[in-house]
Image (tube, rainbow, N blue to C red):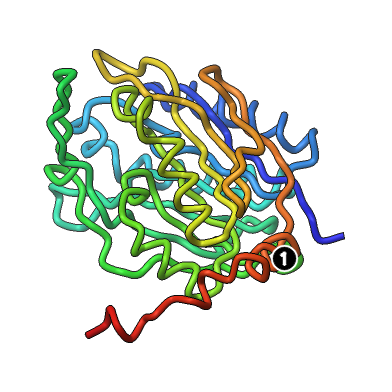
């Protein structure tokens, strides 16, 4: 058998770190009881509140997140993605938004700092300017070979709008793309599922997309709908709008089969567009 269960968790994070960790652990435990071997937490799983407060807490919070992810992966014997948490950038005025994948032994097997920052003034009255407190990552996203499962590519939220990042991941062997997010309710209703399916179809890869949902503070509201999507673009599981998880099987043999049936990756004319 080559298939295994993946879980895209969905929670409503706030500025209460302990409460967020408690909810995250509950969902991790439930997912492992259902047999999930690879589990993803959404972006901002440990803290979703005022940016200045997050910056102030970033040193302490980065340590707490690392310890939490290490403990959870060991306790539940799963591969666990912390989908995005603050790490001090070293200049006292910015952080990095880091996603880290932990192995069953509690050790980091890959990490990624968010490259594309969400600086957008939405028509619903919300203004987002991540670059005011976050530095863009300067390293290419990793492709992590999980023995016995598959090759995983990392990204975070707003990255989903930049297909070249995912083309890089698939070109370098990724069979499953993880896209943890805190997608806004305003943009999510029109773009979230379409973008996820597009990334799955064009790269003939699984997409596992953990998500924030509900109201966090003030007018900040997330779309929800954590999803698992197969390489054909079929939505295998959708968590809806409540806290919980999208859980479905992933199978690297199916990736291989679909890439043989629809060999679009092989048909690319790279040289023409490189000129």
- Identify which residue, 82 or 271, lies in the foreground: 271
- How far across and down, in percent of the image, does residue 114 sit? 32, 54
Q: Residue at x 67, y 71 (%)?
A: 260
Q: Is residue 65 above or below residue 100?
A: above
Outermost residue on the right side: it is 1
Q: Quadrant of the C terminus?
A: bottom left
Q: Position of 28 compared to 88: left or right? A: right
Q: Looking at the image, which is closer to me, 177 or 115?
A: 177
Image vertical order of residue 86 relative to residue 89, above or below:
above
134 on left or right of 200: left
Would residue 90 be found to the left or right of residue 97 on screen? left
Name the side, left or right, on which 108 lies relative to 181.
Answer: right
Q: Which residue is mark 1?
A: 257
Q: Which x, y percent locates residue 168? A: 41, 70
> Could you tell me which residue is drawn at 22 percent across and 39 percent down?
55
Viewport quadrant of the N terminus: bottom right
Asked whether 91 or 219 is in front, the reply is 219
Q: Dot 1, crowdedness within 10 Å: few (<14), some or many (≥20)?
A: few
Tag 1's secondary structure? helix
- The quarter holding residue 195 reads top left
Numbered disc total: 1
Q: Position of residue 244 (x, y in %)?
A: 61, 24
Q: Residue at x 51, y 51 (%)?
A: 178
Q: Position of residue 263 (x, y in %)?
A: 58, 71
Q: Which residue is at a point 46% across and 67% down the rendered structure image? A: 169
């Amino acid at each position: 058998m080559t298939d295994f269960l993946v879980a895209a968790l969905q929670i409503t994070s706030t500025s209460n770190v302990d409460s967020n960790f408690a909810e995250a652990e509950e969902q991790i435990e439930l997912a492992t009881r259902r047999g999930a071997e690879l589990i993803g937490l959404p972006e901002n799983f440990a803290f979703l509140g005022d940016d200045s407060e997050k910056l102030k807490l970033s040193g302490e919070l980065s340590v707490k997140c690392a310890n939490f992810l290490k403990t959870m992966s060991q306790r539940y014997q799963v591969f666990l993605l912390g989908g995005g948490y603050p790490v001090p950038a070293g200049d006292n005025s910015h952080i990095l938004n880091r996603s880290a994948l932990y192995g069953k032994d509690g050790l980091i097997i890959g990490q990624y700092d968010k490259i594309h920052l969400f600086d957008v003034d939405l028509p619903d009255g919300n203004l987002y300017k991540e670059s005011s407190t976050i530095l863009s990552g300067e390293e290419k996203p990793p492709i992590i070979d999980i023995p016995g499962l598959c090759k995983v590519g990392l990204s975070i939220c707003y990255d989903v709008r930049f297909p070249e990042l995912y083309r890089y991941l698939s070109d370098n062997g990724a069979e499953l793309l993880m896209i943890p997010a805190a997608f806004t309710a305003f943009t999510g209703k029109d773009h979230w599922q379409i973008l996820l399916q597009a990334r799955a179809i064009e790269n003939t890869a699984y997409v596992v997309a953990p998500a924030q949902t509900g109201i966090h503070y003030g007018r900040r509201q997330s779309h929800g709908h954590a999803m698992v999507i197969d390489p054909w673009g079929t939505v295998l599981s959708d968590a809806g709008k409540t806290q919980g998880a999208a859980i479905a099987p992933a199978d690297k043999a199916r990736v291989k089969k679909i890439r043989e049936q629809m060999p679009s990756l092989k048909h690319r004319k790279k040289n023409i567009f490189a000129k």
